[in-house]
């Protein structure tokens, strides 16, 4: 992977006619080390967020040795990179073939579920194995999340009681898990989820071996400025203490966005300007899905490339290169008002899902990836032991 000291150097050297994706290894190291050093339990990186091999290797080298996967291909990817790390199959809905292959070919013993039918499928596909670790995912409110995951996954509290009892009967270890939704903007969601787990423990008299609080830890965007992550972790620690359990179960979390969002950005070129509309060479069918469908406002920066940049900012909408009118990003994206055709823009916070969602629709596709060593446009991380907001 070719390296540049900064985005400016990359643009001035390559003058790319196609979208370029940038990776910042230092950002990954900072966030991974923060979770490893501050979370009160085991950190499972959510591979779906960014499966780039270089990113995965940096995460492993930063001390995170556990991975939350959702498919056989993600299992194969992690095993290809490192055969010693621990893999957890935490997608609650899996095919029989995937369960069988994961267990018998890749030695995966940890499976999540949210229904009796899925439990029976796991047991049958593994020939009623006696060494399974089974995690019951319960449904909780995602009211403070930017992306609601509760409609698709999770057992109702009343269903979870029977599921936990069945898993206790058939599993070597059992766990209870929940997910507060993606980009959770209020730490109280985690304490509410932990409280719900406490209610299930009281009703079943079963203390799980593992409590998995899932992902949802936020990153920072121009219009989304959550509390520092150490505030979230303090809330989690307080809620766990309030369970008043004689012996605390092992605690898991599954961060994705909070670890990799700042590590990635995309450089695009302006194709056309129509008043407050900028037509660019990447869009929602490329690396900018988050800016289009969930309408995340991404931090933006015009790359001067040697010319004078106006200090007056204008709010722009973006339109991608495809012929589809859905290829639209509302924004608003604040940029110098003298931006014009041929200028370059960097869009930040795309380390999460930026490369994952790319398609080849209309023939527009770029897999150009480079390393840069400058700071991200917007960051929650100042040092590994201190959180603050700073604009680079």
Image (spheres, helix red, strand yellow):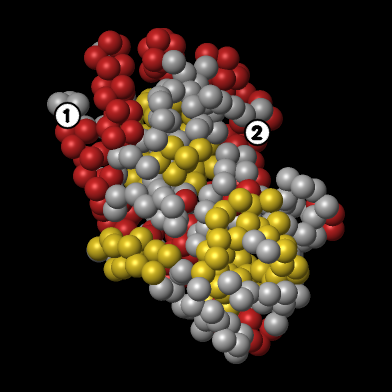
Q: Is residue 275 above or below residue 38?
A: below
Helix or strand or loop: what does disc 1 sit on? helix
Quarter of the view holding residue 121: top right
Depth check, front residue: 299 or 332: 332
Query: Residue tagged by mark 2?
Result: 98
Q: Is residue 338 visible?
A: yes
x%, y% of residue 185?
A: 37, 42
Question: Which residue does the image show at 62% across and 40% down from the upper left?
Answer: 71
Which badge, 2 or 1, is on the more N-terminal residue? 2
Q: Nearer the viewer, mark 2 or mark 1?
A: 1
x%, y% of residue 4?
A: 56, 82
Question: Which residue does the image show at 34% across and 49% down from the upper left?
Answer: 226
Q: Is residue 86 visible?
A: no
Question: Which residue does the image show at 65% across and 33% down from the upper left?
Answer: 98
Query: Residue tagged by mark 1?
Result: 242
Depth check, front residue: 320 or 190: 320
Quadrant containing the N terminus in the rendered view: bottom right
Q: Is residue 251 above or below residue 200?
A: below
């Amino acid at each position: 992977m070719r390296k540049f000291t900064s985005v400016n150097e990359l643009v001035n050297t390559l003058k790319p006619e196609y979208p370029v994706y940038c990776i910042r290894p230092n950002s990954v190291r900072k966030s991974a080390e923060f979770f490893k050093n501050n979370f009160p339990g085991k950190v499972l990186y959510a591979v779906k967020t960014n499966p780039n091999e270089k990113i995965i290797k940096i995460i492993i080298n930063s001390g995170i040795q556990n991975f939350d996967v959702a498919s056989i291909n993600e299992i194969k990817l992690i095993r290809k990179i490192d055969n010693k790390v621990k893999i957890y199959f935490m997608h609650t809905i899996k095919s029989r073939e995937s369960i069988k292959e994961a267990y018998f070919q890749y030695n995966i013993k940890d499976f999540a579920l949210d229904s009796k039918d899925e439990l029976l499928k796991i047991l049958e596909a593994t020939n009623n194995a006696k060494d399974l670790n089974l995690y019951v995912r319960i449904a909780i409110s995602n009211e403070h999340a930017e992306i609601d995951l509760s409609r698709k996954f999770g057992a109702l509290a009343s269903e979870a009681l029977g599921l936990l009892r069945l898993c206790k009967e058939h599993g070597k270890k059992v766990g209870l898990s929940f997910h507060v939704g993606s980009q959770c903007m209020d730490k109280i969601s985690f304490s509410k989820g932990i409280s719900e787990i406490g209610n299930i423990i009281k009703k079943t008299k079963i203390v799980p071996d593992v409590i998995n609080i899932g992902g949802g830890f936020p990153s920072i965007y121009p219009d989304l400025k959550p509390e520092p992550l150490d505030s979230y972790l303090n809330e989690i620690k307080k809620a766990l203490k309030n369970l008043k359990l004689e012996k605390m179960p092992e605690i898991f979390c599954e961060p994705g966005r909070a670890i990799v969002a700042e590590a990635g950005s995309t450089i695009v070129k302006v194709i056309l300007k129509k008043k407050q509309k900028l037509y660019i060479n990447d869009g929602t069918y490329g690396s900018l899905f988050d800016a289009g469908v969930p309408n995340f406002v991404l931090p933006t920066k015009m790359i001067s490339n040697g010319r004078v940049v106006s200090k007056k900012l204008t709010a722009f909408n973006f339109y991608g290169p495809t012929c589809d009118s859905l290829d639209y990003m509302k924004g608003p994206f604040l940029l110098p008002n003298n931006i014009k055709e041929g200028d370059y823009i960097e869009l930040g916070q795309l380390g999460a899902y930026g490369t994952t969602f790319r398609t080849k629709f209309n023939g527009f596709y770029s897999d150009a990836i480079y390393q840069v060593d400058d700071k991200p446009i917007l960051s929650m991380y100042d040092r590994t032991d201190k959180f603050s907001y700073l604009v680079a």
